[in-house]
Image: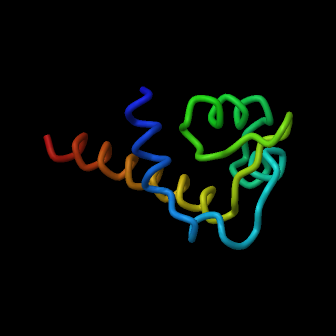
Amino acid sequence: MYEDRAKECSDASFDDIDGEIWSLKEAAAYLDVSYSTALRMARSGELVAWQINDSWKTSKALCKRYVRSQIKKQALICRATYSE
């Protein structure tokens, strides 16, 4: 798990955080998940985010990147399911 998080964080460039910085509450609304789910995702590294004092931050670009990765993952599952 930690290796995956390290890779995800290293793959995130400053371009991904350039622009709109979002609170975790804003990210949760965009991702259509609860705040507690977004917090779990941030803590586990599933969603690239960083903590400043007691506040978690991410960016719009990183949220979009997360959504794209989930779409790709789902497409692979569908292909594997229907190609058998």
**x and y percentages locating residue 61 in the rendered image:** 62, 65
Residue 7 location, x and y as percent?
A: 40, 44
Q: Residue at x 43, y 55 (%)?
A: 11
Residue 41: image x %, image y %? 62, 34
Task: Give me the residue at 76% from left, 68% from top.
Answer: 20
How many labels sit on residues? 0
Which quadrant of the view contains residue 45?
A: top right
From the viewer's side, name the closer residue of 56 and 73: 56
| Horizontal arrangement in the rendering, residue 37 relative to residue 3 (left or right) | right
Question: In x, y percent, where is residue 50?
Answer: 69, 44
Compared to 70, does 5 lie above or below? above
Residue at 72%, 33% (x, y): give it: 39
Determine which quarter of the picture holds residue 19: bottom right
Of all residues shown, which one is farthest toward the left? 84
Q: Dividing the image into 4 quarters, which one contains the N terminus?
A: top left
In the image, residue 4 sits, relative to residue 30, either above or below, namely above
In this orientation, which residue lies closer to the viewer: 84 or 54? Answer: 54
Up-down: is 19 above or below 74?
below
Classify residue 26 as left or right of residue 45: right
Residue at (64%, 64%) from the top-left corner?
Answer: 17
For residue 83, side relative to residue 15 (left or right): left
Q: Nearer the viewer, residue 10 or 24?
A: 10
Q: Relative to the observer, which residue lies in front, 76 or 40?
A: 40
3 over 23 or under it: above or below: above
Colour mode?
rainbow
Give the side of residue 64 with respect to residue 32, left or right.
Answer: left
Quadrant where the C terminus lies? top left
